[in-house]
Image (cartoon, helix red, strand yellow):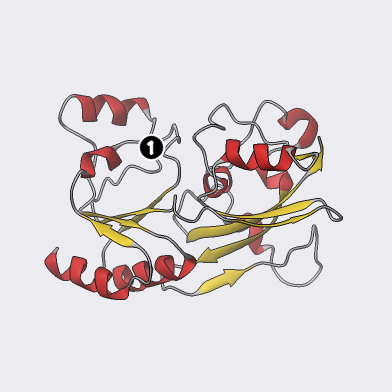
Amino acid sequence: LPELVRELEAALTDGTVVTDGLEEYAADTYWKAVAARAAGSPLGVPDVVVHASSEDDVVSALEVANRLGVPVVPRGGGSGSQGGAVPTEGGIVLDLAGLDRIVDVDETSLTVTAEAGVNGLRLEQELNARGLMLPHYPASVDLATVGGYVAARGSGVLSTRYGKIEDLLMALRVVLPTGEVVETVPVPRHAVGPELTQLFVGSEGTLGVITRATLQLVPL
């Protein structure tokens, strides 16, 4: 653990490494994880939490984890109900809440590009102010994040009209376990090569860490 902390602190550009108060990260909203934490026997507690503030921090953390053989669990708003953010093997919880920039709103093409840690309700409010909306309304919209929408293959109360998150997703930026960054093509369909964007939908952090998504909008 001391070696892991030293390497992470040396590698991070803007982020921070935390080794106290780790019980907070022992559960998302999965009932079994919540009950186990309340009973004093959590399903998993991280050895360290990395609060990333940029994609560079995500790259650095994954490079260190890959080199040392340490498991990593990405975490957004902690609103998942299936235990996807529970660190059952310890290791690093990679908190992405600091990746909270709305990068671009294209009012002509009706798309928004946002970092993974952008809160769903905040995004909706900012889009509404422009006369637009992201028609993805999960029950957890006040807690969930853009990265979590995609990683958990989210659906919502308007999905029967507008589609689920995979139908609204245009492109992703993802950091692979080795620290390499993949950016998919920001178009609805393309004829050449495999469709990598959908590969990461519903992956729950197992294939890489989503850092940015481009999503389709509709008029308010």
What quarter of the picture does the C terminus occupy? Answer: top right
Tell me which residue sits at (29%, 47%) in the image: 87
Q: Is residue 107 above or below residue 54?
A: above
Residue 156: x, y in percent?
Answer: 64, 30
Residue 93: x, y in percent?
Answer: 32, 52
Circle 1 is placed at which residue position? Answer: 83
Residue 190: x, y in percent?
Answer: 80, 66
Tell whether 207 sits left or right of 35: right
Would residue 185 be visible to someone looking at this image? yes
Tell whether 68 sits left or right of 114: left
What quarter of the picture does the N terminus occupy? Answer: bottom left
**Mark 1: few/some/many CA within 10 Å (<14, 14-19, 20+):** many
Q: Nearer the viewer, residue 94 or 203?
A: 94
Q: Is residue 95 above or below residue 10?
A: above
Q: Nearer the viewer, residue 116 or 171?
A: 116
Tell me which residue sits at (77%, 45%) in the image: 217
Residue 111: x, y in percent?
Answer: 76, 53
Would residue 134 be visible to someone looking at this image? no
Q: Is residue 189 above or below residue 164?
A: below
Q: Nearer the viewer, residue 105 or 195?
A: 105
Q: Quadrant of residue 50?
A: bottom left
Tell me which residue sits at (30%, 72%) in the image: 64
Mark 1 lies on a secondary structure that is: loop
Tally of marks: 1
Specify the farthest residue to the left.
2
Q: Of the residues shown, which amino acid type is indicated by label 1? A: Gly
Q: Quadrant of residue 61?
A: bottom left
